[in-house]
Image (cartoon, helix red, strand yellow):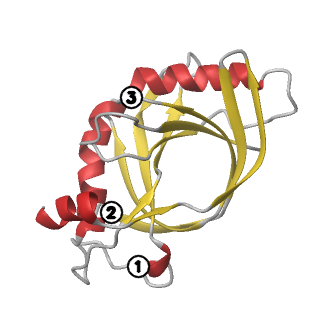
């Protein structure tokens, strides 16, 4: 636990590599089209719980892994954003499952430490292209749903096509940061 706290307060922070391909906007919603690099990710999947509750279960597991609960006993530093996949129902509400994706820092990409918790998996993921919009505050499930709806509306009438069965919610800040928080919604380009 101490390693997790030390890592989140004093560890290095690396940004998940991406390239902005284009920008756009409609009314009060601006967005970017980004090509995000693939790589190795630590993942935790939670089912049968609402999104906010599932995050409270999954995030400490990821943070402990990053903070040193791994076979090497080392804190790796942070990569932002941490993203999690959510799965919308036809009415826009979210299914009771999510998958948290933490991109392993570049220094450990070739040989990530083995997680000490069996629910934390290491997975290889191809690069993705996303449509992204940003918002602030301490985000909850209702905020993600609202901003995903706004982004979809902003993309109407454009050539943009994206997956409808999954999208990503992202966060850049530790929980103890009270102001200037950054969250995003990512719709995955098809």
Q: Quadrant of residue 96?
A: top left
Q: Quadrant of residue 61?
A: bottom left
Labels 3 and 2 touching (C-beta < 8 A)? no
Image depth: mark 2 or mark 1 in front: 1
Residue at 31% x, 41% y: name it: 55
Tell me the distance, in whole angstroms, between the alpha carbons under discs 3 and 1.
32 Å
Mark 1 neighbour density, 10 Å: few (under 14) some (14–19) many (20 or more): some
Q: Which residue does the numbered mark 2 point to in the structure image?
A: 120
Q: In which quadrant is the C terminus drawn?
A: top right
Counting residues from the start of the chain, the first of labels 3 and 2 encountered is: 2
Tell me the distance, in whole angstroms, between the alpha carbons under discs 2 and 1.
12 Å
Tell me the distance, in whole angstroms, between the alpha carbons under discs 3 and 2.
27 Å
Residue 170 left/right relative to 166? left
Q: In which quadrant is the N terminus drawn?
A: bottom left
- Badge 2 element: loop
- Badge 3 element: loop
Image spot of residue 174 (x, y percent): 31, 47
């Amino acid at each position: 636990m101490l390693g997790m706290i030390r890592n989140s307060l004093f560890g290095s922070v690396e940004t998940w590599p991406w390239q902005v391909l284009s920008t756009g906007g409609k009314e009060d919603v601006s967005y970017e089209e980004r090509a995000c690099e693939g790589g190795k990710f630590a993942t935790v999947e939670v089912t049968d719980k609402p999104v906010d509750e599932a995050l409270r279960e999954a995030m400490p597991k990821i943070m402990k892994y990053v903070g040193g609960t791994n076979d090497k006993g080392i804190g790796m530093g942070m990569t932002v954003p941490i993203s999690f996949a959510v799965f919308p129902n036809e009415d826009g509400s979210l299914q009771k499952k999510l998958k948290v994706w933490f991109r392993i820092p570049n220094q450990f990409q070739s040989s990530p430490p083995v997680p000490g918790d069996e629910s934390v998996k290491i997975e290889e993921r191809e690069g993705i292209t996303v449509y992204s919009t940003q918002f602030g505050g301490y985000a909850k499930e209702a905020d993600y749903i609202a901003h995903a709806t706004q982004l979809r509306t902003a993309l109407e009438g454009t050539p943009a096509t994206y997956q409808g069965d999954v999208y990503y919610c992202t966060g850049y800040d530790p929980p103890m940061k009270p102001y200037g928080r950054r969250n995003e919604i990512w719709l995955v380009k098809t």
